[in-house]
Amino acid sequence: MERFSVGEIVEQAVQTEKLGYAFYTSLAKRFEKDGKLNKLFQSLALKERVHEKVFSGLKGRVKDAEPEKPGGSVQVFKGDR
C-alpha cells in the first residue's frame, strides 16, 4: 500500500475541492433558467471554494510527516510539542 505524506494528502484535498467548485459552477450555468437549481449549485460551489481555502491554509501548517500509524501518534502541525 502506497503511503502519502500529510502535505500530499492536504494537496489532494485542495485539488478535489477545486474540481468540485468547477463541477458545481458548470451545473449552475447549465440550470441558469431554473432558479432553485441554479441557487443550489451556486451554493454548493461556494462551499467547495471555502473548503479549498481551509485546506490551502493547512498546507502551510503541516509538515511532510507520514500519516499516523494505528496505535501510534505523529506530530503534524508546526509548533506542536
Image: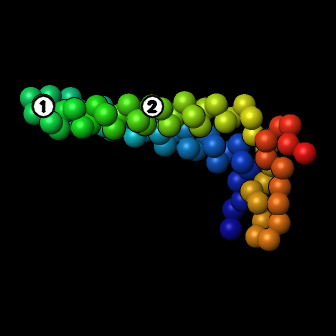
The amino acid beneath tag 2 is Arg
View extreme (left): residue = 33
Residue 74: x, y in percent?
83, 55
CA distance separating discs 1 and 2? 21 Å
Residue 20: x, y in percent?
40, 40
Mark 2 lies on residue: 49
View extreme (front): residue = 81
Q: Is residue 19 left or right of residue 81?
A: left
Q: Is 26 situated above or below 74?
A: above
Residue 71: x, y in percent?
80, 71
User: Dot 2 surroundings within 10 Å: few (below 14), some, or many (20 or more)?
Assistant: some
Element type at mark 2? helix
Label of residue 35 in the image = 1
- The residue at the point 82 percent across, 60 percent down is 73
Query: The C terminus is located in which quarter?
Result: top right
- The first of marks 1 and 2 along the sequence is 1
